[in-house]
Each structure stands twice: as structure tokens, then as C-alpha cells.
Image (tube, rainbow, N blue to C red):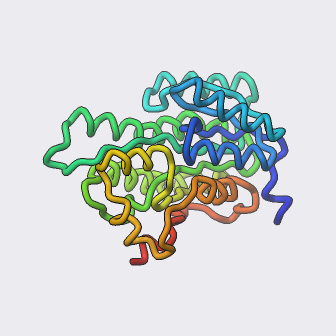
């Protein structure tokens, strides 16, 4: 099994790779031997991730893109196809959040968050599935959230989008499993990413309210989510398909 966790230079595309769970996941799959294509909107953040990976002996390439935009995703797909011809896995991690009651939620903010949290997953899957099907034992991992399973105060658009990610992942598993493409979603619980820390520091979210629902009594670190993500796109998870994996410290059993 340990050998199956390793990659042999195969290409893994990670969106939202500039920070948080995305960066930690990129570092994890690179440590296992993948060539990682780092995707995000900010070049400086991607270069920091690339430097960290290469410092540890890994391989990474940078591609600046806004994956909520079809043209950017198509350009990313064309780049991967031209350079490698195929890819082993796509990890759709890019996302954002906005804390608000639905009655106070502006339409433009709803559309913006649906675009980055849900539409981006659709664009990435649609454009990359043909490349994935050229590889042996390919997979897609879509990063959803526990909020796609449960309700939480003032999270209407995020919960709706992440619920959509879970359902889309399940549907793709139905449609492409027979061709050998595994599709799963991962649902992190409360994780101390820079974005979450920012919510706490802004006072928009009370960390004690969140922690009261987590049975382990603490927040996850980004690498705790990344370790599960790396496993799910490796051949060690070869019979995990159509699953929505909760990595939440027991948040959803409360």
C-alpha cells in the first residue's frame, strides 16, 4: 500500500494552491512524487508554494488563472495538454466565502461566490476529463465542506455551493466510473487556513461557536486535510469512488 501512495512524476493540477488547504495539498502530493501544477490568481503566492516544494526536492509549475472564468480554465487545460498531454489528477480547491443572512445577501455577491465555489469545479471537470482519461487510474477530487452537509449560521451561498460540489461529484462518479475515472469530494471541517483566521479576526465569526460543535475540541491544521486529499488521488485509494469524505473532527456527528 505504501508504494501505491507514491506518484512517478505524473501531473496533478491543484487549484487554489497559493495558500491554506490548497498549498498544503500541493506540497503533500509533491512530496509523494507528483509533478504539481499550481493554480491561483496571485503569482507571488504561487511562487511561494513552488519555492517550498522545490526546497524539499519536489517538482512544481505555476499557472496564474481565475478558475471561475471559462477562458482561464481553457487556457490552463491547453497548457497542460501541450506540455504533458495528460494528467493524473485534478484537485479543485479554489473557493471563497461571504458571511451574511440570505436576506442581506447582494445578488452580485451570490453570483461571485457561486462562480468561484461551484462554477469553477464544473469548468475544471468539463475541460480536464478528456486529459484525465488518457492516464492510468486518474481521479478528480473536489474540495467541498461540512457546510455542504449541515447548516451553519449566515452561510447561505457557501453552503449552497458546497452542497452543489458534493452532488456534482457524485454525478460525475456515476457518469465516468465505467471509464476508470474516480471522482470524490472531501469535506473539511473547521480548518485554520488564512481565510478562516481572517474571519475570526474580523469578528464576523465566533470561534467558540464553531468549536462547540467539533468533538475533538480543536481546529484542523491545513496539512491534516491535505494528507487525506493526497491519499484520495493516489492509487492507494483505487476503490474509493463517488464518496464524500468528512474530515471534520466529529463536527457532523454532533
Q: Can see residue 178?
A: no
Q: Nearer the viewer, residue 186 or 152?
A: 152
**Residue 206 sits in which quadrant?**
bottom left
**Above or below, comparing residue 66 to residue 7 in the picture:** above
Asked whether the viewer can see residue 236, the reply is yes
The x and y percentages for residue 172 are 51, 51
Please state which of residues 219 and 110 is positioned toward the viewer in this rendering: 219
At x 37%, y 47%, the residue is 201
Task: Decide: is 140 above or below 251.
Answer: above
**Picture coordinates of residue 103, whole percent (x, y):** 13, 48
Left or right: residue 61 compared with residue 202:
right
Quadrant including the N terminus: bottom right
In the displayed orientation, state which residue is furthest to the left: 103
> Residue at left 61%, top 40%?
14
Residue 131 as seen in the image, left or right of residue 153: right
User: What percent of the width, then of the height, locates residue 195?
Assistant: 44, 44
Where the C terminus falls, by quadrant?
Answer: bottom left
In front of the other: 156 or 90: 156
Q: Which quadrant of the structure image shows residue 151?
A: bottom left
Instruction: Tell me which residue sits at (48%, 22%) in the image.
Output: 71
Amino acid at each position: 500500500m505504501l508504494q501505491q501512495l507514491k506518484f512517478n512524476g505524473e501531473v496533478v493540477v491543484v487549484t487554489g494552491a497559493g495558500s491554506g488547504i490548497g498549498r498544503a495539498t500541493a506540497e503533500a502530493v509533491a512530496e509523494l512524487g507528483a509533478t504539481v501544477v499550481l493554480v491561483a490568481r496571485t503569482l507571488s503566492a504561487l511562487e511561494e508554494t513552488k519555492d517550498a516544494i522545490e526546497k524539499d526536492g519536489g517538482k512544481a509549475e505555476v499557472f496564474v488563472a481565475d478558475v471561475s472564468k471559462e477562458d482561464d480554465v481553457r487556457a490552463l487545460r491547453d497548457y497542460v495538454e501541450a506540455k504533458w498531454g495528460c494528467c493524473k489528477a485534478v484537485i479543485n480547491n479554489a473557493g471563497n466565502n461571504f458571511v451574511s443572512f440570505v436576506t442581506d445577501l447582494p445578488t452580485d455577491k451570490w453570483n461571485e461566490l457561486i462562480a468561484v465555489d461551484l462554477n469553477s469545479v464544473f469548468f475544471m471537470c468539463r475541460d480536464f476529463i478528456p486529459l484525465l482519461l488518457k492516464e492510468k487510474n486518474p481521479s478528480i477530487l473536489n474540495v467541498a465542506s461540512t457546510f455542504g452537509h449541515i447548516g451553519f449560521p449566515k452561510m447561505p451561498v457557501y453552503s449552497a455551493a458546497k452542497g452543489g460540489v458534493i452532488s456534482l461529484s457524485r454525478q460525475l462518479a456515476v457518469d465516468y466510473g465505467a471509464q476508470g475515472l474516480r471522482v470524490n469530494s472531501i469535506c473539511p471541517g473547521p480548518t485554520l487556513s488564512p481565510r478562516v483566521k481572517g474571519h475570526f479576526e474580523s469578528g464576523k465569526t465566533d470561534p467558540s461557536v464553531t468549536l462547540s460543535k467539533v468533538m475533538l475540541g480543536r481546529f484542523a491544521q491545513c496539512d491534516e486535510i491535505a494528507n487525506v486529499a493526497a491519499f484520495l488521488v493516489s492509487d492507494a485509494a483505487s476503490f474509493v469512488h463517488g464518496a464524500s469524505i468528512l474530515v471534520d473532527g466529529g463536527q457532523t456527528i454532533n
